[in-house]
Image (tube, grey):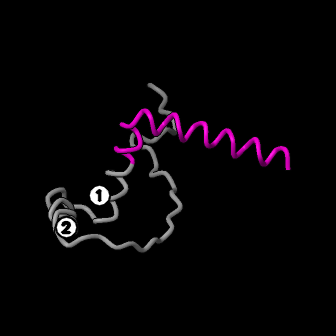
Amino acid sequence: MSRRTNTPVIKPQPKVHFEQINFKIDTETLEKLRGYAEFINSEQSYVIREALNYLFESDSTFQEFFASHLRSDSNSHETS
């Protein structure tokens, strides 16, 4: 008889902290956002999160900027 481990087949959903933001968006873009959310059967906030994460991951220049910005922020906190 084989022994089963207590490892689930599907990993638990990660806990994510959410913050609410308010912003203005033009009507045409909002219509596309609503349409895309309907197309993938998801919430609009999910589409926005995924689109932003795709943008952040795709833009290597931004990644370099962000990494150096994080380093400079952590250095300023260390010297305070």
Q: At 82% across and 44% down in the image, what residue appears?
A: 78
Image x and y of residue 47, in percent: 29, 58
Q: Residue furthest right?
A: 80
Between marks 1 and 2, how big is the CA–CA gap?
9 Å
**Quadrant of residue 68 in the image?**
top right
Q: At 47% across and 71% down in the image, what residue appears?
A: 20
The N terminus, quarter of image? top left
- The three-letter amino acid code for the residue at tag 1 is Val
* Residue 73 position (above or below residue 18): above
Q: Classify residue 1 as left or right of residue 41.
A: right
Mark 1 is surrounded, within 10 Å at the Cα level, by few (under 14), some (14 to 19) or many (20 or more) other residues, namely: some
Q: How many marks?
A: 2
Which residue is identified by label 2? 34
Mark 2 is surrounded, within 10 Å at the Cα level, by few (under 14), some (14 to 19) or many (20 or more) other residues, namely: some
Task: Write the start and end of the magenta stretch as one range.
Answer: 53-80
Majority secondary structure in the magenta region: helix
Image x and y of residue 38, in percent: 16, 64
Q: Secondary structure at mark 2?
A: helix
Depth check: give the residue in front, 56 or 8.
56
Q: Classify residue 29 as left or right of residue 45.
A: left
* Residue 7 position (above or below residue 34): above
* Residue 31 position (above or below residue 8): below
Which numbered circle lies on residue 47? 1
